[in-house]
C-alpha cells in the first residue's frame, strides 16, 4: 500500500489487508528456580527449542538471555496467539532443563560481572568495541515493529512518534532494582543502556536521504559496520519496512506486552492518517523530549510530564488519557479495543515496577520479587507443551 486516502486505509484495515503489521521481540531472563539467580544456559534452551522455536528463538549477548520474536503478525489477535505460543514453548524448554524464564527489564539482584558473553563473532566485536559498557548490559527489553507504507513515510512517522515515547516508557517501566538495590527509579534498564553510543532519543531527520546519508557516513568512517548498531529508542529499521519501538522494558505479563504493542500500532496509524490529510503532529527537539523521558523512567505513572504546547506540567495519567482519546478511532478500526482497555487497567493498578516494589515493601526479600516476576511471566501460558 502506498500513500492512500483515509477512506481506503480504513477499508483495507477492515479487510485485514493493511500494512500496519506487528512484530514483537521479547528478551527473557534464564533463572535458576532454587537460587533465583541468572544462569548462562541460552545455548541449551536454543537447542532444546530447536524443533518448535527455530527461527523464533535466539541467544543474546549474555548467555543468561534469550530473545523470542514473532513472525509478521497481520493483527493483534495473531500477535497474541504467537506471543502466548512462543512463551509457552520457551517455558517448556526451560522446564526440561530444570530452569525458569522471567520477563522484566532487569534481574533484581544478579551481578553483571558473573554473566558470561555468548561466543559469537557479532557479540565479540561489540564487546571489543564497547568493553565494559557492553559487559554491564545485562538488561531485557521489549521491541515492537509496526509496518509502514514506505520508508519515506517512515522517517516522517519516526520524527513525530518520538513525542509519545515517554508516555510509552512510563507505561512500561519494569526495572526498579539493580544488583540487589532499590534504585529509586521505576526503570533502571535504560540508565544502563544509555552508556551505549547511538542510543536514547533520536534527533529528527528532514528526509530519508538525510537519514541514509547519516548511516553511510558512519559506515564509511568505521563508526559502525551496519545500521543495526544504531540503538535508538525508536528507529526506522535498517532492513525491514517497519518503525521499531525500542524504549520499553520487557513486560512480565503477556497482556501488558500486547497492550503496549496495540498502542504503538494505533499511534503509527494515526500519524499516517494525519499525513494523508497533509497534517503533521508537532515535532520537538531532543533536548525537550529528554526531559519527559527522564521523568517517565524516574516516576513511571506517578509523575508529571511536561506539556510543551501548554508550557506546564501535567499528571502522566492525564496525558495518557488524552493519548487514548487521540487514537480512539484507529483503535476501533484495528480491533484493539480490549488491548487499550488493558492500558487503562495499567493506569489504574500500576506498572510492572509498581508491582515489583509492592512485593519488596511487603517482604523485603529479593527472592520473592523474582518469584513474583516468574509467576507473572507464566500467566496465561499453555504449560502442557
Image: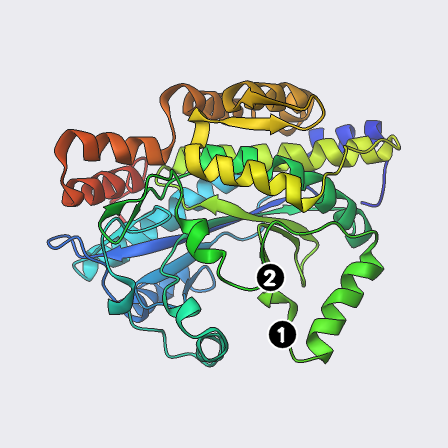
Mark 1 packing: few (<14 Cα in 10 Å), some, or many (20+)?
some
Res 250 visible: yes
Q: Earlier in the sequence, mark 1 or mark 2?
A: 2
Disc 1 to disc 2: CB gap under 8 Å: yes
Residue position marked by numbered label 2 in the rendering: 198
Q: Residue at x 15, y 52 (%)?
A: 33
What is the x, y in percent for residue 92? 26, 53
Q: How is the image coloured?
A: rainbow
Mark 2 packing: few (<14 Cα in 10 Å), some, or many (20+)?
few
What is the x, y in percent for residue 318? 55, 18
Who is closer to the viewer here, 259 or 88? 259
Who is closer to the viewer here, 296 or 154? 296
What is the x, y in percent for residue 311? 67, 24
Furthest residue in direction right, as rendered: 278
Residue position marked by numbered label 1 in the rendering: 224
212 lies above or below 104: below
Q: Residue at x 23, y 63 (%)?
A: 39
Q: Residue at x 44, y 22 (%)?
A: 347
Q: Is residue 12 left or right of residue 167?
A: right
385 lies above or below 43: above
147 lies above or below 332: below
Q: What element does badge 1 sit on? A: loop
Q: Is residue 234 left or right of residue 343?
A: right
Residue 275, picture quadrant: top right
Res 332 visible: no
Query: Looking at the rendered structure, which numbered label has been put on residue 84?
Result: none
What is the x, y in percent for residue 37? 19, 57
Q: What element does badge 2 sit on? A: loop
Figure quadrant of the N terminus? top right
Amino acid at each position: 500500500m502506498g500513500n492512500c486516502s483515509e477512506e481506503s486505509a480504513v477499508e483495507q484495515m477492515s479487510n485485514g489487508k493493511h500494512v500496519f503489521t506487528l512484530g514483537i521481540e521479547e528478551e527473557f531472563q534464564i533463572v535458576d528456580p532454587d537460587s533465583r539467580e541468572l544462569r548462562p544456559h541460552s545455548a541449551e534452551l536454543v537447542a532444546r527449542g530447536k524443533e518448535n522455536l527455530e527461527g523464533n528463538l535466539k541467544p543474546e549477548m549474555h548467555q543468561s538471555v534469550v530473545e523470542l520474536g514473532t513472525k509478521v503478525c497481520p493483527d493483534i489477535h495473531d500477535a497474541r496467539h504467537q506471543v502466548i505460543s512462543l512463551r509457552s514453548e520457551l517455558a517448556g524448554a526451560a522446564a526440561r532443563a530444570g530452569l525458569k524464564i522471567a520477563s522484566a527489564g532487569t534481574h533484581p539482584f544478579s551481578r553483571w560481572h558473573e554473566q558470561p558473553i555468548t561466543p559469537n563473532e557479532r557479540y565479540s566485536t561489540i564487546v571489543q568495541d564497547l568493553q565494559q559498557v557492553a559487559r554491564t548490559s545485562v538488561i531485557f527489553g521489549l521491541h515492537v515493529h509496526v509496518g509502514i507504507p514506505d520508508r519515506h513515510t517512515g522517517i516522517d512517522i519516526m520524527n513525530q512518534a518520538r513525542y509519545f515515547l515517554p508516555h510509552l516508557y512510563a507505561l512500561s517501566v519494569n526495572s526498579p532494582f539493580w544488583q540487589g538495590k532499590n534504585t529509586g527509579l521505576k526503570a533502571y534498564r535504560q540508565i544502563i543502556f544509555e552508556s551505549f553510543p547511538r542510543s536514547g532519543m533520536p534527533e529528527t531527520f528532514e528526509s530519508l536521504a538525510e537519514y541514509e546519508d547519516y548511516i553511510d557516513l558512519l559506515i564509511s568512517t568505521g563508526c559502525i559496520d551496519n545500521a543495526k548498531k544504531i540503538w535508538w529508542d525508536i528507529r526506522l529499521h535498517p532492513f525491514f519496512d517497519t518503525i521499531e519501538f525500542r524504549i520499553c522494558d520487557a513486560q512480565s505479563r503477556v497482556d501488558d506486552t500486547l497492550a503496549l504493542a496495540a498502542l504503538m500500532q494505533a499511534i503509527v496509524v494515526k500519524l499516517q492518517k494525519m499525513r494523508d490529510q497533509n497534517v503533521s503532529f508537532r515535532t520537538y527537539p531532543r533536548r525537550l523530549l529528554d526531559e519527559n523521558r527522564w521523568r517517565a523512567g524516574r516516576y513511571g505513572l506517578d509523575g508529571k510530564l511536561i506539556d510543551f504546547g501548554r508550557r506546564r506540567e501535567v499528571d502522566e495519567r492525564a496525558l495518557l488519557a488524552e493519548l487514548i482519546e487521540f487514537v480512539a478511532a484507529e483503535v476501533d478500526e484495528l480491533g484493539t479495543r480490549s488491548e487499550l482497555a488493558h492500558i487503562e487497567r495499567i493506569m489504574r493498578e500500576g506498572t510492572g515496577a509498581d508491582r515489583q516494589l509492592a512485593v519488596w515493601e511487603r517482604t523485603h526479600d529479593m527472592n520473592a520479587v523474582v518469584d513474583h516476576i516468574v509467576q507473572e511471566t507464566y500467566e496465561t501460558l499453555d504449560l502442557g507443551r
